[in-house]
Image: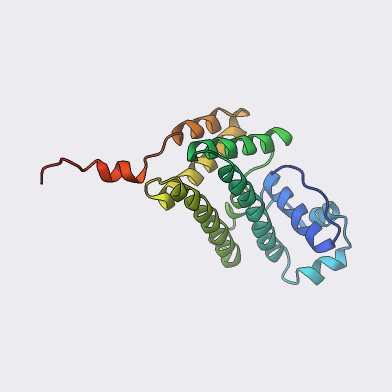
Amino acid sequence: MGVVPRPSDAKTRFITSAALLFQRRGYSAVGLTEIIEAAQAPKGSFYHHFPNGKEELAAHSLRWAGDYVAKHFERAFAEAPDFGAGVAAMARTVKGWLEQTNFEIGCPIVSISVDQVPQSKLLTETAQSVLADWVERIAAHAARHGLAEPRDLALRLIIAYQGGWVVARIQQNFAALDDVVRQFRDPPRENAVHDSGVGELH
């Protein structure tokens, strides 16, 4: 995710500012004072909107960032002529986010959950919900294209994106994301799986 417009209301500014800071430095490295300063909102309003503190804010940030990414998933796959083209379109989106931020941002789920899951029940359940939503959205497009085992395919793709995103940041280039596109260029179709058993002797 790249730079997003600054919203007008304080609660949303807290959420978006926290999400972007977490993506750059992780949950534990970002303090409340920094979030409040980035949001340019009164300190007193923070506890009005988030009485349970940073953990509650992080859960809201996870949901917001998860929805932001999900909308890009939907756009990439809805506008693509086939599943492989959708994978390539989403990879280009991730590349754009990395390029715009000089490879500083990580995946919004990983940036929060890497040191808070499973210790935080709230953040664990929120991250699980976001992940499940991503899987279902991608699986729906895989099924629309008649691909085999769409939910398994969707989960494998998310795992590949996550790994590609991390390696791209480490290597400071897009080779790993290009490899993800190659891996999912032509996934097996449902009919092909069924047809593979035709003619076998039992």
Residue occupying image coordinates x 49% and y 37%: 84
Residue occupying image coordinates x 72% and y 70%: 52
Q: Residue 86's quadrant in the figure?
A: top right
In this rendering, the answer to whether 185 lies above or below 70 is: above
Q: Residue 49's quadrant in the figure?
A: bottom right
Look at the image and name its color scheme.
Answer: rainbow
Relative placement, left or right, of 31 versus 158 is right
Residue 19 location, x and y as percent?
71, 52
In this rendering, the answer to whether 149 lies above or below 180 is: below
Residue occupying image coordinates x 43% and y 52%: 151
Q: Is residue 103 visible?
A: no
Quadrant of the rendering where the N terminus is positioned? top right
Relative placement, left or right, of 152 versus 4 is left
Q: Residue 200's quadrant in the figure?
A: top left
Residue 44 location, x and y as percent?
87, 68
Task: Spot the residue most to the left.
Answer: 202
Q: Nearer the viewer, residue 70 or 119?
A: 70
The tally of labels here is 0
In this rendering, the answer to whether 39 lies above or below 11 is: above
Q: Is residue 168 visible?
A: yes
Q: Nearer the viewer, residue 137 or 189?
A: 189
Residue 115 location, x and y as percent?
59, 54
Relative placement, left or right, of 51 versus 83 is right
Residue occupying image coordinates x 81% and y 57%: 13
Q: Nearer the viewer, residue 24 or 158?
A: 158
Residue 111 location, x and y as percent?
63, 49
Relative placement, left or right, of 186 versus 181 is left
